[in-house]
Image (cartoon, coloured by chain):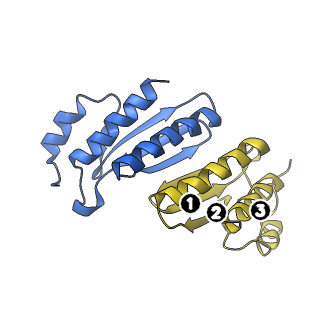
Chain colours: A yellow, B blue
Amino acid sequence: MEALSILEIERILEQLDGWEYIDGAIETSFQFENFKEAFTIMTRIAFECEAQGHHPDWSNVYNSLHIRLNTHDVEGVTEKDFRLARAIESIVDSE
Amino acid sequence: MEALSILEIERILEQLDGWEYIDGAIETSFQFENFKEAFTIMTRIAFECEAQGHHPDWSNVYNSLHIRLNTHDVEGVTEKDFRLARAIESIVDSE
């Protein structure tokens, strides 16, 4: 899988809500009601990551979740990152 | 609950394995076999955090987990942080 160009990344990002390209990865943040809600969503995302065989660089502080996606093998952003980003959006939106 | 002095923090840290005082918090990192093992441990820690009503600033990338604990109310490290740190050690050691 090849790294997408910044032009391609920017074009695909237009279809996603709240993600941006920062320093070689696509990133977003979410705020939930509390820690329990945040970790519940993280658990659903974790199962999706495992199913896709693709994993985030993510951090959590109480009710906030920050997610950074890139593809280490190609040191850039690929369609794998967007596939996971779309799944994450779908999980968060379904709450 | 009062913030501990750096002297007190350093003394208590001697009883813990692999934690250090960095910039107003106590921190540690763990490496697990893979993402699933890391997230399994995170889930057990999450339940403990919720039970203690005290939550970490933590990040995960694949099999690695970084944890930073401090007490926001007093902008420092308190006994609450060490209580959670000991519980985290116990969870990780039980694997």
Distance of label 2 from label 1 (alpha carbons): 7 Å
Question: Within 10 angstroms of label 2, few (less than 14), some, or many (20 or more) residues?
Answer: many
Q: Secondary structure at mark 2?
A: strand
On the rendered image, what quadrant is the C terminus of chain A found in? bottom right
Instruction: From the viewer's side, name the closer residue of A74 and B70.
Output: B70
Is A64 displayed left or right of A22 in the figure? left
Q: Chain of mark 2?
A: A
Mark 2, residue position: A27
- Residue at 52% x, 53% y: name it: A59
Residue A62: image location, x then y, percent: 44, 59
**The furthest residue to the front:** B51
Residue B55: image location, x then y, percent: 39, 52
Mark 1, residue position: A66
Three-letter amino acid code of the residue under disc 2: Glu
Q: Is residue A62 above or below residue B83?
A: below
Q: Chain of mark 1?
A: A
Distance of label 2 from label 3 (alpha carbons): 12 Å
User: Quadrant of the rendered structure where residue B64 is?
Assistant: top right
Upstream in sequence: badge 2 or badge 3: 2
- Residue at 81% x, 62% y: name it: A5
Three-letter amino acid code of the residue under disc 3: Arg
Mark 3, residue position: A86
Q: Is residue A38 above or below residue B29?
A: below
Q: Is residue B74 above or below residue B18?
A: below
Distance of label 1 from label 3 (alpha carbons): 15 Å
Do the residues under discs 2 and 1 have CB atoms within 8 angstroms?
Answer: yes
- Residue at 29% x, 46% y: name it: B81
Upstream in sequence: badge 1 or badge 3: 1
Question: Within 10 angstroms of label 3, few (less than 14), some, or many (20 or more) residues?
Answer: some
